[in-house]
Amino acid sequence: MSGHSKWSTIKRRKGAEDAKRGKIFTRLARDITMAAREGGGDENSNPRLKLAIVKARQANMPKDNIERAIKRGTGELEGANAIEEITYEAYGPEGIAFIIEVMTDNKNRTLAEVKHAINRGGGSLAASGSVAWQFTQKGYLTVKSEGKDFEELFMVAAEAGADDVSEEDDMFIIYTPREKYGAVAQALADAGYETDESELQWKPQNETQVSNEKAISNLRLIEMLEELDDVQDHLVLTQAPPP
């Protein structure tokens, strides 16, 4: 029995890992498709696509999957027009504000799943605009600092339109206005800098400390939302007045 039990555990673990990998690949493929749909299939002239492909490779996504996702975006394969990018706004337990970004080919299904998770987690879906005003969307890029000169990177990023560059631990952190994100990413690439992370983020205008109990209840809701296939890699939240 112990041998059977051990094998069952291994099979369950492998199944969970495969499911997780499949979910990650689905999210990455949608991001690649949307990037190709918006800016074309040439990664050298499409910074968003280039960064999406880098993330996919870092996750060991097969080359065939990446190529199919690009072709869907450029119209060589069907499927791109069915994908929509949607942003939901919500309140978590005790008035914490959430912004939830999704990519979906079935917005009715996704809305139902997001609502269900929020309700289970003790939160409530909010009206459009009631939460977003508390955030500013920024480009976010990081570059490993080892062997690189801060002043040189600063000048490259600033001249391309970055509005904040800092050094934390072993990373340079670059923030850009939303509309300058692509230009800064391309300028860094042209100058030979390899980005470690790169994405558009919703940055809270104000941050505040919360109690452990409040943090734990909201983390549970985050976990529920991140289990949904259509929810993208990151959620953002901030303290907010109760709805």
Image (cartoon, helix red, strand yellow):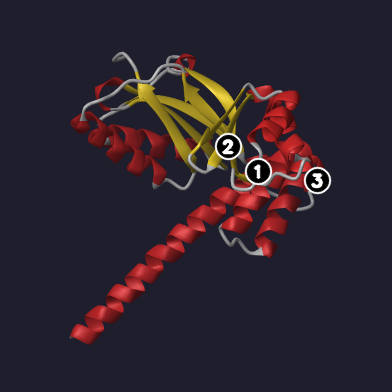
> Which of pointers 1 and 3 lies earlier in the amino acid sequence?
3
Disc 1 to disc 2, how far (Cα)? 9 Å
Q: Nearer the viewer, mark 1 or mark 3?
A: 1
Q: Residue at x 47, y 48 (%)?
A: 229
Mark 2: give few (<14), some (14-19) or many (20+) Cα within 10 Å. Answer: many
| Foreground residue among 115 and 226 | 226
Residue that carries the numbered disc 1 in the rendered image: 148
Q: Residue at x 21, y 32 (%)?
A: 212
Which three-letter amino acid code belongs to the residue tagged 2?
Answer: Phe
Residue that carries the numbered disc 3 in the rendered image: 44
Residue 199 marker: none
Q: Residue at x 31, y 14 (%)?
A: 243
Disc 1 to disc 3, how far (Cα)? 23 Å
Where's residue 1, x and y in %? 18, 86
Which three-letter amino acid code belongs to the residue tagged 1?
Answer: Lys
Q: Secondary structure at mark 2?
A: strand
Residue 59, above or below 135: below
Q: Secondary structure at mark 1?
A: loop
Residue 64, above or below 190: below
Q: Residue at x 26, y 25 (%)?
A: 210
> Which of pointers 2 and 3 lies earlier in the amino acid sequence?
3
Q: Secondary structure at mark 3?
A: helix
Where's residue 59, x and y in %? 56, 58
Mark 3: give few (<14), some (14-19) or many (20+) Cα within 10 Å. Answer: few
Which three-letter amino acid code belongs to the residue tagged 3?
Answer: Asn
